Image (tube, rainbow, N blue to C red):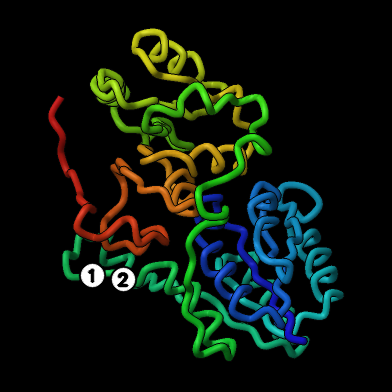
Amino acid sequence: MSHILVLNFSNMGDILMTIPVIDSFAQQHPDVRLTVVSRAGAKPVFALLPANVSFVIADLNGEHHGWKGMNLLGRRLLALQPTHIADLHDSLKTKYLRMRFALAGQNVKKIRKERHTRKRLLQMDTKATQTCFIEKYADVFRRLGYKDFHPHFKSIFSVGGANLATILPKFDASLYQKRNWVAVAPFANHDEQIFSLGLMEEFIGQLSARTDVNIFLLGGQKESSTLAAWAERYPCVEVMSDQLHGLIEKAALISHCSVMVCVDPTDIHLASLVAVPVICIRKDTHLTDGSQSFSILQPKEIMTRIDQYLH
């Protein structure tokens, strides 16, 4: 039985972007065992994938920190006896692990990041385009020998969305059933990615004036005071910071929304994993940089770039 070790120590948004590819591969090749090696925060989402997918935590800030930690992780992974290595990150740490696996005789392939094209994009070369990362991830599996592999993915949940009664037992969905649900996540991990909060509040105010919409504000504890102030000012606006703990609960709520509005890459890809259309306001991303999520609900015709906006 083939055993593919999948390496990815990237940020959460990039890790989530690999899920449609890994899920599709696991579904199409049930006789192949996959072990994903990644950050602990992603483990609950990967637990929803087929039974032939397992997960190993890479504790990069603790037990597996530094070269000593990488050697420890490398020994543990070699003990799993993988036959193939798929490096979906190509970082300094995964390069080191790749070298160890190659010396041990495993079939090793890495993502082709097209760094030369990215450099041209940063220089504002309008003719430069990046292959979509979803396709880059799939290409790694094809080069491992599965040449007929093509990703086909719908959602990490079943048709109709997550079972809210099971995942969010304290959330009474019946209170909001007569309206369309809209999830709004106005904050990001990096301040430079956050859109004007004044304009975002104006948008929420206009949207809340509709009689057919419920707005759910998503964010962390440090943003809860801002979100609570918006919820006080406008009708049919709920702050979900205290009710959603972890990616699965957040994804469960989003799966029942008609649309999601966000600024952070993690939220973009999380919504894509539950087949919900996304309106993403990004100030730092080019349309051709390859970071599009896996979703047929977001055709290129609705992707736009705003270089300047008026207050």
- Is disc 1 surrounded by few (<14), some (14 to 19) or many (20+) residues within 10 Å? some
- As helix, strand or loop, the secondary structure at mark 1 comes to loop
The earlier-in-sequence mark between 1 and 2 is: 2
* Disc 1: which residue: 128
- Vertical order, 70 against 215 (above or below): below
Q: Residue 182 has which mark?
A: none
Q: In the image, residue 309 lies at what x, y percent?
A: 15, 34
- The residue depicted at 67 percent of the width and 30 percent of the height is 169
Residue found at the very far left of the displayed protein? 310
* Disc 2: which residue: 117
Q: Amino acid at mark 1?
A: Ala
Q: Is 160 displayed left or right of 290 in the figure? A: right
Q: Amino acid at mark 2?
A: Thr
Q: In the image, residue 177 lies at what x, y percent?
A: 45, 29
- The residue depicted at 79 percent of the width and 59 percent of the height is 69
- Vertical order, 295 against 207 (above or below): below
Q: Is 281 displayed left or right of 7 in the figure? A: left
Depth check, front residue: 52 or 68: 52
Q: In the image, residue 108 lies at what x, y percent?
A: 64, 84
Q: Is 289 displayed left or right of 1 in the figure? A: left
How many numbered callouts?
2
- The residue depicted at 59 percent of the width and 87 percent of the height is 144
Depth check, front residue: 264 or 163: 163
Asked if the residue under mark 2 is in contact with the one under mark 1, i.e. CB atoms within 8 Å, the reply is yes
- As helix, strand or loop, the secondary structure at mark 2 comes to helix
- Vertical order, 42 against 262 (above or below): below
Q: What separation in Å lies between label 1 and label 2 (alpha carbons)?
A: 6 Å
Q: Is 262 displayed left or right of 255 in the figure? A: left
Asked whether the viewer can see residue 198, the reply is: no
